Amino acid sequence: MNALTYAPALFLHASAGVNPAPTPKSRNLVQMDKVAEFIGDDPDTQRQVFDLCLDLIVTNLPQLRKAMEREDTAAVARLAHRARGSLGMLGLPMLKELGEAIEYGYDELGTVRWHARCEELYQLFVALRQELKERLAA
């Protein structure tokens, strides 16, 4: 079961009327039942997939941060789309929700809330990177 909390940076948006979504606190982001459903229960195959996912995250983290800093909404949306497709097999419902909000919700959310969702995605990547490193080290 995932424990949820609010990322400290998101409290900055509270005064602007942003309703931040919960972000993961625990390191149990990967839902192993979903992993087994999507790719099977072979530990070697799972390790290979975790390694590929970790490579994607390590590559995308700096790209996401740069795109966010440049306010390049198209680049952020592409990264969110790629993450949903590539990391979806890890069973992360938050990734689906955040990715869709970022990719399709800019006009509906408005700038401040959309930026908050981008920061949540970045923090999700950070937490997922750590979890995958730990799973691969085990």
Image: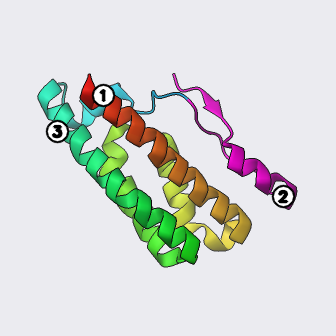
Task: State the residue at coordinates (30%, 28%).
Answer: 135
Snapshot quadrant of residue 54? top left
Snapshot quadrant of residue 119? bottom right
Instruction: Name the residue type under label 1.
Output: Arg
Q: Which residue is mark 3?
A: 48
Q: Which residue is mark 1?
A: 135
Crowding at label 1, few (<14), some or many (≥20) Cα neighbours within 10 Å?
A: some
Instruction: Name the residue type under label 3.
Output: Gln
Looking at the rendering, the stretch of residues picked out in magenta corresponds to 1-25
Snapshot quadrant of residue 51? top left
Please provide percent x and percent y for residue 10.
71, 50
Task: State the residue at coordinates (49%, 70%).
Answer: 66
Task: State the residue at coordinates (55%, 77%).
Answer: 70
Mark 2 and mark 1 residues within 8 Å of each other at the beta carbon: no
Determine the CA span between mark 2 and mark 1: 38 Å
Mark found first going from the N terminus, 2 or 1: 2
Determine the CA span between mark 1 and mark 3: 11 Å
Q: How many marks?
A: 3
Q: Which residue is mark 2?
A: 17
Q: Is residue 12 magenta?
A: yes
Question: As displayed, is residue 13 above or below residue 137?
Answer: below
Crowding at label 2, few (<14), some or many (≥20) Cα neighbours within 10 Å?
A: few
